[in-house]
Image (spheres, grey):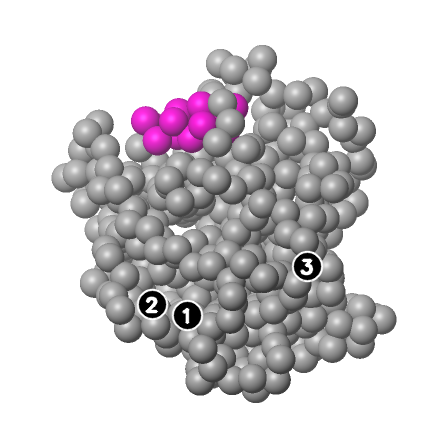
Amino acid sequence: MNQAPLNENDTHANNKNEAAVGHNLQAQKDQQQQQQHAGRTTVTEIITIKEQVPQIREPDVPHPNNQDPRKDPPTSKSNHTVERVNGAFVILARNSDLDSLRPTILELEARFNHRYHYPYVFLNEKPFDTAFKRGIEEVAPDSEIEYGLIPNEHWSYPPWIDQEKARQQRQIMKQKKVIYGDSEPYRHMCRFNSGFFYRHPLLAKYKWYWRVEPSVKFPCEIDYDPFRFMQENRKLYGFTVSIKEFVETIPTLWNTTVKFMEQHKDLMPKNNLLHFVEEKDSKNPGGKSIYNRCHFWSNFEIGSLDFMRGREYNMYFDYLDKAGGFFYERWGDAPVHSLGVAMFMNKDQVHWFKDIGYFHNPLWNCPQGDDHKRLKCTCDPKLSIDIKNKQWSCSLEFKDLPFSPIKS
């Protein structure tokens, strides 16, 4: 795959592949036996899909009004053409991400947001510089854009973490060649996305968020408003890709979650989604269920900020945070969000955006059949994870789950 390893000094690890990325292939193969679970194929095998990922560049898509956003002055940002709901794009980025963000935003604007002008909120643990702001505003001239600084306490070690122990654990994971296993910034990023992004003051006025990352692609028209769809259909969480997590990154996450559930049974509705993330242990069929490693790939998610800010989810995050797994292991925000969703929502409140074309290296969600033509997709539908690698697609497992009526 054409993805470089994380550099702790100059990247947010914003091309976050919680389940599969293409590097250290041979070393990962040495661990396949440990990753096999109840006879299933392993995450490592996804990495062996050696399709060529084209070099990211600004796509040749027409700008709304047939104008070049890099040359024309911004129009009035209050004159959006279609009524909006109270939502915003949320992007965690660094100044060095500008070149990988511009084509993403240009494509998102051309495929969807030129009709709505939803605002953007950029967050960074360091101030955004003038060049970054200018470069972003050139490709989204008609949208409100805000830039926020992440509070230090949201991007640092909490006082209960033994930093020397955390350092030693990073070295152990490095020796085992666990993806991002030795990265300190990656852990801060995962913790921030798990429990703090929605607390940022710039998001206080919004009800909905749509997460976007650098270098992702939107290869199809989005001919309706996903925010409005979520609101009008009483959805709380939406995704495009669901896949299985690397087991080496989360050795105690499920057991910690089970302890939380045992202590807080009153928080969980009876018709929740736990059956999406748990399965019987083939080694101990009569014992407790275990985590099947399914999670929603959180580099794309559209969700309710009220849910994220709510009592139940934050009690869960605080419990995990005190357990230390963000630093002593390498818990990612994707499984953390997903387990929170599974505990506190039912299937009717979660939506698979199968008709939104999406690419995050190395995985595709590409609309099929008539949708592919109607939405003018440029992706190959055969590359969709639920088509090319069905054994890996937790999306198909989600689709097959029974619906549970939402209680009024």
In the image, what residue occupies the spot 29% across and 46% down?
150
SS label for mark 1? helix
Q: In the rendered structure, are the residues bearing label 1 and label 2 in contact, judged by CB atoms less than 8 Å apart?
A: yes
Callout 3: few (<14), some (14-19), or many (20+) C-alpha neighbours within 10 Å? few
Residue 318's quadrant in the figure?
top left
Instruction: Measure the C-alpha gap from mark 1 to mark 2.
Output: 6 Å
- In the image, taking residue 33 as reference, residue 380 lies left or right, namely right
- Which circle's residue, 2 or 3, is located before the other in the chain? 3
Q: Nearer the viewer, mark 2 or mark 3?
A: 3
In the image, what residue occupies the spot 43% across and 54% down?
121
Where's residue 213, x and y in %? 46, 61
SS label for mark 2? helix
- Which circle's residue, 3 or 1, is located before the other in the chain? 3
Amino acid type indicated by mark 2: Lys
- Tag 3 residue: 82
- Tag 2 residue: 133
Q: Nearer the viewer, residue 403 or 152?
A: 152
In the image, what residue occupies the spot 25% across and 66% down?
129
Query: Magenta span covers which residues?
Result: 312-323
Residue 167 in the image: above or below residue 83: above
SS label for mark 3? loop
Which quadrant would the C terminus be assigned to in this image?
Answer: top right
- Tag 1 residue: 137
Residue 246 in the image: above or below residue 156: below
Residue 295 in the image: above or below residue 13: above
Which circle marks residue 62 in the picture?
none
Instruction: Measure the C-alpha gap from mark 3 to mark 1.
Output: 21 Å
Residue 299 in sight: no
Q: Nearer the viewer, mark 3 or mark 1?
A: 3
